[in-house]
Image (cartoon, grey):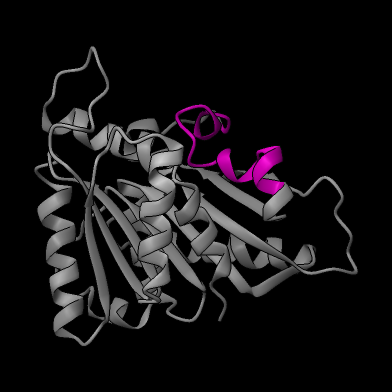
Amino acid sequence: MQYNLFVPKNYDRTRSYPMVLFMHDAGTVSSNPLITLTQGLGAVVWASPTEQAKHESFVLAPQFTGEDEGSDGNTTYLKTIKGLIDSVTGKYSIDTGRLYTTGQSGGAMTSSALDFNYPDLFAASFLVAGQWEDLDAVKPLAEQKIWAVVSQGDTKAYPGMTGIMDTLADEGAKISRAVWDGQSTVSEFAPLAAEMSAKGTPVNFVALKKGTVVWPGLSDDSGSNHICTWRAAYTIEGIRDWLFQQKK
């Protein structure tokens, strides 16, 4: 498995660092390991100078070829990802109590599948435009810390993630829910994220309001809503801050 690893600029092996695992969507499968760094903010936002100044961390971004994804729950490939995490955390001074997973679309599904199979691995998960067909399988997520973002105009992920959240609520999970304007600026997202984070619920679910997500020039259909979800979600600083606040 090819992968990208960001090491903090002033890495000091006497300290212990968190690590974010980012997994891209199925639309960017490639043998070129750099594609995951150029298809959006999901991988690179964590490594930006401003983010590192606040949350100094490692960032691990695998590049899938299409034959090595775990979004369908394939345990062989999930073991490969788990082995990659173990290898990196064994080589560097990384706090295994502060491992975080995030991904968009198929990457969000792979994050979920890792949570099913390795429930003690991550301190929290940031799921963007994800879903899961078998709602019985998602029940273990009721014990996890999750922040999920979808678009109401996404005819697959929106009902899919809503079903997941309803299932988790039935399992006893405490969930905060909200609908936000998908065209909000970074400064406009800030108080919304702060308000939800302050509630202290282990699971947070944000739906971006239908008709506010798709960028100008794109057709306002389900596919565009799907893609534009992650273009908005990874700009929300408060969700990134929330992620780093979680510990095992």
Quarter of the image with the C terminus in it: bottom right
* Residue sitting farthest toward the top: 217
Looking at the image, which residue is at 58% across and 56% down? Answer: 20
186 vs 170, left or right, is right
The quarter of the picture where residue 183 lies is: top left
Highlighted magenta segment, given as a residue range: 33-52
* Residue 40 lies in the magenta stretch: yes
46 vs 130, left or right, is right
Picture coordinates of residue 52 (x, y %)?
70, 48
Q: Nearer the viewer, residue 242 or 219?
A: 242
Q: Nearer the viewer, residue 96 or 204?
A: 204
Judge whether residue 41 can be spotted in this image. Answer: yes
Judge whether residue 70 can be spotted in this image. Answer: no
Looking at the image, which residue is at 56% across and 40% down? Answer: 45
Q: Nearer the viewer, residue 20 or 206?
A: 206
The quarter of the picture where residue 189 lies is: top left
208 vs 59, left or right, is left
Looking at the image, which residue is at 26% across and 69% down? Answer: 176
* Residue 164 lies in the magenta stretch: no
Question: Where 187 falls versus 13 (above or below)?
Answer: above
Looking at the image, which residue is at 13% across and 38% down? Answer: 210
Question: Where 84 falls versus 169 (above or below)?
Answer: above
Picture coordinates of residue 65 (x, y %)?
44, 38
Picture coordinates of residue 43 (x, y %)?
54, 41
Q: Nearer the viewer, residue 149 or 84?
A: 149
Question: Where 183 falls versus 244 (above or below)?
Answer: above
